[in-house]
Amino acid sequence: MAYDLFITRQNKWFGDDEAKQIPIQEWLDYLFGDATMRWVKLSQIKLPVGETFKIEQEAIRIWQKDPGHKQCDFAWVIYHNGHIIVKNPDLQVIDKLQHIAFKLQAKVQYENGNMFELHTNSPAAR
């Protein structure tokens, strides 16, 4: 089952309180201090209908996971409208999201706006 997790400061990520959005510059400052977040200038994918979808944005990064990790070895981390979004995160990515949320004084939420609870054994809680 596909799902997204959001890093946000709002009560619900889909809220419209601009004062609680994560400013783009704060996100970029975080990214420049995290060597594990790699910038990819252009991302593109060939769609089943034969068209190519392209995206180019300074605030999108790839987080390179541990080389020995058996599943997908990276995660797309996308900034959009004051939130950070990751699709289908596994436990290793969730730990990274919790770390980022802690650093940004934010929280991780599910698509429905429910809080994703910080695990006490997560690296972000240490």
Image (spheres, rainbow, N blue to C red):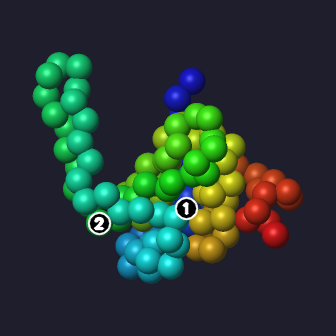
Residue beneath label 2, please? 58
Q: Quadrant of residue 77?
A: bottom left
Q: Is residue 19 above or below residue 12?
A: below
Residue beneath label 1, please? 8
From the top left corner, tell me how far across and down residue 91 is, in percent. 69, 43
- Residue in the picture at 57% in, 24% down: 1
From the top left corner, tell me how far across and down residue 118 is, in percent. 77, 56
- Which secondary structure lies at badge 2? loop
Q: Nearer the viewer, residue 37 or 98?
A: 37
Quarter of the image for the C terminus: give it. Answer: bottom right
Q: Nearer the viewer, residue 37 or 29?
A: 37
Q: Is residue 118 above or below residue 54?
A: below
Q: Residues within 10 Å of mark 2 (few under 14, many from 20)?
A: few
- Residue in the picture at 63% in, 42% down: 69
**In the figure, is residue 85 to the left or right of 9?**
left
User: Given the image, on which type of amino acid does mark 1 rest?
Assistant: Thr
- Does residue 35 appear in the picture of this structure? yes
Q: Residues within 10 Å of mark 1 (few under 14, many from 20)?
A: many
- Residue in the picture at 31% in, 58% down: 40
Name the residue at the top extreme. Answer: 49
**In the figure, is residue 105 to the left or right of 47?**
right
**In the figure, is residue 79 to the left or right of 86?**
left
Name the residue at the front extreme. Answer: 68
User: Given the image, on which type of amino acid does mark 2 rest?
Assistant: Glu
Q: Is residue 87 above or below residue 123?
A: above
